[in-house]
Amino acid sequence: MPRKTGLNRETIVEAAVELVNREGVGALTLHRLAAHVGVRPPSLYNHIHGMPGLLRELALFNARQLAEQMGRAVIGQSGAPALEKLANVYRAYIKANPGLYWISLSAPQPEDDIELIEAQQDIIQIALLVIESLGYQGEQALHIVRGLQSLVHGFTTLENLGGFGLELDCEVSFQYIVSTFIRGISH
């Protein structure tokens, strides 16, 4: 097998993202990834620390990408329009990155490295700023962030898995649910 030039951590992570988004989390093995980038599996170890290192890199990539997209979407906005935009961007991200998103579902643990924890906290901070613009603070705001995350995650996961069998437009359903959620917390 010829040596793959330009192989580095970033190209490996991008290839892993492509693989899990296209074929699912179960497809991610170091052997499959090495074949995907055109190297032998030991070559990956020059750039990542095995499967645990790859999963950490994917979680970090996911957190950074999601925070960037969320932040860009709501910058300069507040209140209900910002919350609606946040929900829509979150849903679009999950739909576009189903495998990457699934790998990154675990909450950060104390033993996780600080870089990963900070990247994941950026997502929460963006959501909290939007919720705080609706007048909520502290634990109450965190409960609402959890509710929003659960709503978007649950709906989009079912949608991605083909769990909605009725011939109703999922876009209409999602917008209805989000607007109902927003009205509920606005009273």
Image: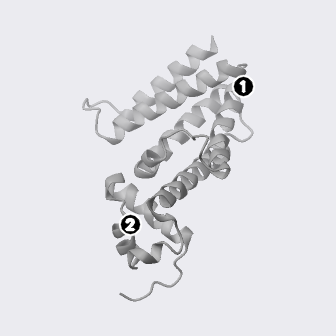
- At horizontal 46% and vertical 47% (from top left) the residue drawn is 101
In this image, 162 relative to 81: left or right? left
The quadrant the C terminus occupies is top right
Q: Position of residue 14 (x, y in %)?
A: 49, 65
Q: Nearer the viewer, residue 49 or 1?
A: 49
Q: Is residue 177 above or below residue 49?
A: above
- At horizontal 67% and vertical 20% (from top left) the residue drawn is 139
Instruction: Name the residue that disc number 2 marks.
Output: 30
Q: Nearer the viewer, mark 2 or mark 1?
A: 2
Distance of label 2 from label 1 (alpha carbons): 43 Å
User: Which type of secondary structure does the marked residue at label 1 adopt?
Assistant: helix
Looking at the rendered structure, the number of numbered marks drawn on it comes to 2
Q: Is residue 28 above or below residue 157?
A: below
Q: Quadrant of residue 134?
A: top right
Mark 1: few, some, or many residues within 10 Å (few <14, many ≥20)?
A: some
The quadrant the N terminus occupies is bottom left
Q: Nearer the viewer, residue 167 or 178?
A: 178
N-term-proximal mark, 2 vs 1: 2
- At horizontal 61% and vertical 30% (from top left) the residue drawn is 83
Q: Quadrant of residue 61?
A: bottom right
Extreme-top residue of the structure:
187
Q: Nearer the viewer, residue 73 or 90?
A: 90
The amino acid type, in three-letter code, at marker 2 is Leu
CB contact under 8 Å: marks 2 and 1: no
Q: What colour-coding does the image apply?
A: one colour
Extreme-bottom residue of the structure:
2
Instruction: Name the residue that disc number 1 marks.
Output: 132
Q: Position of residue 46 (x, y in %)?
A: 52, 75
